[in-house]
Image (cartoon, rainbow, N blue to C red):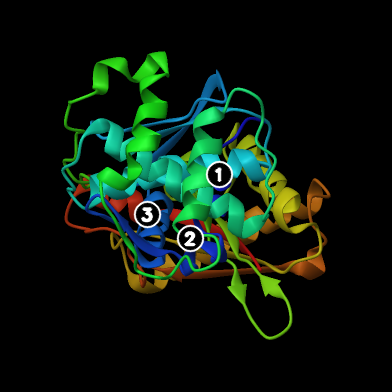
Amino acid sequence: MPLNEMDVLTAVGDAVLNKLDFTVDGLHIRGEAYRKIFELIRDEQILVVSGDDEGLATYSPDTDTIKTQKADSPADLFNKSILVHECTHALTDMEFVKMTAKANESAAYLAQAVYLLLKDPKPTVPAGYGVVKTAIQLARQFGLDSNPGSRRRISYDEIVPLVKRLDEHPGYHSAQARISMSNGISAKIPKHLRVEGSPERIGPSTATATIGFRVPNDELFAFDSFRLKPGAEQRLREAAGYIKQRLGPSHKIYITGHTDNVGGAGYNKRLSRQRAQAVADFFVKEKLFNSSLLQPGGDGEEHPVADNKTPEGRAANRRVVIEAM
């Protein structure tokens, strides 16, 4: 399975990023900002698509889209660091920071390097990633491996060694003086199968995580029906597969149906419960989850995620949420 949205959420939701607090040429790299990027990806305001270039991921400020590198999911540490790199570009875009393209790349490489060092003091860097090795050397020089929350302000002059290293890379020659694009994140209505996740919650004992999916009702049920449509099974198998891969087969599964506000509130709540039960019945019939783990329920129109005054908003509100924790 290729890298996907959940891999990006897992990387940018890593609790170790909460330790970061430093500035590179005007870009404030900090845990709070990465949490915002996490939320934007989760809410489909920043989109994630799977790429087919090995080792090369990109962030497009024009479309607010992260294209992952070609690698297998779940991502290993180095591939996670590449995703953190691209999320740093998204951070620059989100905050309208104006800097040269090479300064932007240098900042992202430094963030990537610090992430690697905090996860592994002696990280393995694959061949062909000399820029990352230079970034790691600079991160150690700046003390970001031992004190990433120092609020250190790193000037452009201090990252010149990294900029020069980028000069040796053929892909950056044309970006020497160009200002990197930074136009903010445009508002979007979620339309796709939504893969949700939450950053690890670190407690006194173990770390736990929540993984969930929001599937539009229109992909599962016909109008005014709680019988699964042909083709809905694939969506539900996809959801079950992700949950099992990330958390295993033994977590509680909460299935909640939601509707728009068309029709009576009582009827909508009953329909949402029936639809959640239909999903639970499918999981049991297909032996995807044990019935004792499933908790189906319906909230009707009580918890909209969009404005019910528009057709697009009503479509977004008609959904089934499947959460595992």
Of the pair 94 and 268, the residue shown nearer to us:
94
Tell which circle, 3 or 1, labels the residue nearer the N-terminal end: 3
Q: Within 10 Å of the Cα at label 3, are there few (<14), some (14-19), or many (20+) other Cα atoms? A: many
Q: Nearer the viewer, mark 3 or mark 1?
A: 1
Left or right, 202 with reference to 199: right
Eyeballing the image, is 322 above or below 181?
below
Left or right, 152 with reference to 124: left
Label 3 secondary element: helix
Relative image position of residue 149 (x, y in whole percent)? 43, 70
Q: How many marks?
A: 3
Q: Which residue is mark 1?
A: 81
Eyeballing the image, is 264 above or below 135?
below
Q: Within 10 Å of the Cα at label 1, are there few (<14), some (14-19), or many (20+) other Cα atoms? A: many
Relative image position of residue 141 (x, y in whole percent)? 48, 54
Cα separation between marks 3 and 1: 15 Å
Q: Which residue is mark 3?
A: 37
The answer to whether any part of residue 108 appears in the image is yes
Q: Nearer the viewer, mark 1 or mark 2?
A: 2
Of the pair 70 and 29, the residue shown nearer to us:
29
User: As shown in the figure, which amino acid type bears the numbered disc 3?
Assistant: Ile
Cα separation between marks 3 and 2: 22 Å
Tell which circle, 1 or 2, labels the residue nearer the N-terminal end: 1
Relative image position of residue 298 (x, y in whole percent)? 51, 69
Q: Which residue is mark 2?
A: 144
The answer to the question of whether label 1 and label 2 lie on touching residues, with beta carbons closer than 8 A, is no
The answer to whether any part of residue 65 appears in the image is no
| Residue depicted at x 36% and y 39% | 106
User: As shown in the figure, which amino acid type bears the numbered disc 2?
Assistant: Leu
